[in-house]
Image (cartoon, coloured by chain):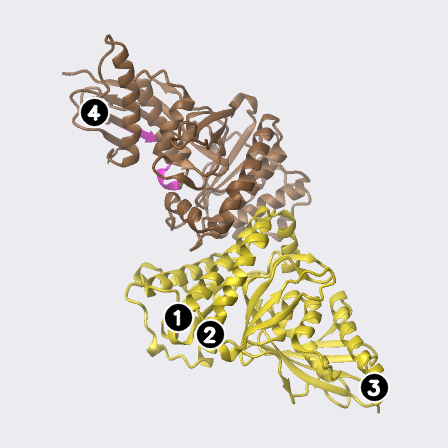
Chain colours: A brown, B yellow
Amino acid sequence: MSEIYYATSTGPVNIATLKYWGKRDEDLNLPTNSSISVTLDQAHLRTLTTASCSSKFETDQLWINGASYPLDGARSKQVMADLRSLREEIENGDSSIPKIAAFPLHIVSENNFPTAAGLASSAAGFAALISAVAKLYKLPTNASELSKIARKGSGSACRSLLGGYVAWEMGDLANGEDSKAVQIADKKHWPDMKAAILVVSDMKKDVPSTSGMQLTVHTSDLFQYRIKEVVPKRFIAMRKAIIEKDFPTFAELTMKDSNSFHSVCLDSYPPIFYLNDTSKRIIKLINLLNQSAGEIIAAYTFDAGPNAVIYYEEKNEKYVLGLLHQFFSHLGGWESSSFNPKDAVIPESFPLSSLDKDVYSQGVSKVILTQVGEGPSETDDVLIDLQTGLPK
Amino acid sequence: MSEIYYATSTGPVNIATLKYWGKRDEDLNLPTNSSISVTLDQAHLRTLTTASCSSKFETDQLWINGASYPLDGARSKQVMADLRSLREEIENGDSSIPKIAAFPLHIVSENNFPTAAGLASSAAGFAALISAVAKLYKLPTNASELSKIARKGSGSACRSLLGGYVAWEMGDLANGEDSKAVQIADKKHWPDMKAAILVVSDMKKDVPSTSGMQLTVHTSDLFQYRIKEVVPKRFIAMRKAIIEKDFPTFAELTMKDSNSFHSVCLDSYPPIFYLNDTSKRIIKLINLLNQSAGEIIAAYTFDAGPNAVIYYEEKNEKYVLGLLHQFFSHLGGWESSSFNPKDAVIPESFPLSSLDKDVYSQGVSKVILTQVGEGPSETDDVLIDLQTGLPK
């Protein structure tokens, strides 16, 4: 029987603090503005992917959490073609290495979190897939270069090729060769960044991100000002705040950019709403917390959905998780954290009694307590059966 | 007993289609942008006010719906002073007329709609008060001139001095003398404009308009672009659409400006939310209606609160009220209209079965069916007891 070549890698989720919204080139996924994100710890949110290839496989195939998916979408085919092309270059330059670039690929992925929760699973998925195939093909390509391939698969996925604090530089070139992810700082630079994710129950999204962002590009008057005037300045200021570990500035910019992104969604025609009444109550809680703390100790941000991601520094966990525990202690997710509810402190001036606890506890289905994390990493896990080439 | 001088006038509600949001001068209520509104029929929404004065009254006093209010706020005092000053000019020029400018005023007002519903009651109130006092004082002042006084009382109130389709020209002068309401077209020009108001139940507003708009002025990046680039063009286009009775254009601009206004609220820091999940469902219904009708036949607009005002032309009532009746037939307000539910037509392609009727029927407490209306009008009603000078 022909040999099966295989390799396994992980891919992390990233949550933008300066949002990507708008493509200037839809085929190449080139953005209208640069963006910034924090890569999250893979202990809580990651995709694990084994990439394998063999002459005996019939066609490229993908399995995610046991379900089979065709790999015939334009974006997936582009990603595969780019990776194969890099492998072919190596094979063409060295006749001693096996010629596997043309072999069909079997890709097997598993997420350690619910796919449907709207938690950037496609970013983690593309990052793991590309990292696994790059390992399988023994590509010498660095993460920023691979991020350009990921970008073509799913724009924000490019940021998941790197750990820590990541910028996606929009670039200028028409071919997208300078539109890639770069690391602003690694996890160790500012390791005490924590993230509390509140998964908000909601009906299915009305408007998927891709069509939503292009509706904004084409119909929002305010959008042009956002990408030309607001984001470029904010990008510089946020990068500086990360380098200087200036949490209040980082947090204020993060909240303002979340607001700005949802503003241009609302300014689209017809308007797009991703925040619901639960999201708005969470925003209010965080604002009240910061006011009562006398400084900004927590930052909310919302992607194209109602889930809240709240960034804070470990030293303020007693306040931030203390407050969230007040309203969401009944939900799953606390057990995975080292937070002890006994340590909770509610700032004295927090107007707890003025908030209807029943109302403010509504609408959230799960808490995920995590932190800044590393980029994709190779592992020895093998998700395929090496005899059959199918998922184990 | 000394004589009581009195006069009575009405004041209408106006609902902006191009929104006023932001003051460039807080004392004079000078706006950062021009705005446009439709004055609504007083059969459904109006304030009726009797203004009286007498040497025997002790102090300026106001009663609204039977409750007594002091007239000692800075804005009310300014309005009274301006009106008295105009009367004094007349008295000084003609010694034959009674010297009543210095007499204390008793003002008695009644609204024919619930004050607390967030339905621009202060605009109707100031318009009625100013019109009644102007009549009492026999001021020769025209409505646009009176609108400058109303503006100092409550910015958007200035538009209620005129009927039909009204522009509030922001003006350039620092003293505000050119910041006034002018009529774009009277009711007769385009009489088939109808308005359906959906009163949305909500908790008390988090942020009152005055502090909300100044938060936006001072913190929203997108706001500057709205007032400098977006609104000036939209103002010209909307005025033209009114003059040409071009409903689809008028409606699209109205919806876009509502979206834009709520966008800059959301872009404020901390963000301001006036739309709730019920408002968003109403927006969706109207968008679906327009899509299924194949043209824009209805326009939603939302002020600083969750209530929806839906403008449409009488010829499309069977579609617009037909759709609203589908979801809100259980509410009060239908009986005052000539609409017969038997005439309802739902466009064939409207995706009625895909909308959860229980969900879409939620959150609205009352329907008000009205239309474009006239400005303040004098009446023979008298709300004060001419013996006591107190409310009847």
Q: Are marks 1 and 4 on the same chain?
A: no
Q: Which is closer to the viewer, label 4 or label 2?
A: 2
Alpha carbon distance from label 4 to label 3:
101 Å
Alpha carbon distance from label 3 to label 1:
56 Å
Q: Earlier in the sequence, mark 2 or mark 3?
A: 3
Q: x and y percent of residue B274 in the render?
A: 55, 57
**What residue does disc 2 label?**
B194
How crowded is the residue under tag 3: few (<14 C-alpha within 10 Å), some, or many (20+)? few
- Location of residue B305 with respect to A263 vertically, above or below: below
Mark 3: amino acid: Asp
Q: Are marks 1 and 2 on the same chain?
A: yes
The numbered disc on residue A50 is none
Whether tag 4 and tag 2 are in contact, CB under 8 A, the answer is no
Nearer to us in this view, A305 or A139: A139
Mark 1: amino acid: Val
- Location of residue A245 with respect to B188 vertically, above or below: above
Q: Which chain does the numbered disc 3 sit on?
A: B
Quadrant for residue B32, please give it.
bottom right
Give the side of residue B219 with respect to residue A325, left or right: right
Residue A120 visible in the picture: no
Q: x and y percent of residue A95 in the render?
A: 23, 9
Q: x and y percent of residue B122 in the render?
A: 64, 70
Q: x and y percent of residue B92 in the render?
A: 85, 81
Q: Are marks 4 and 3 on the same chain?
A: no
The span shown in magenta is A108-117
**What residue does disc 4 label?**
A104
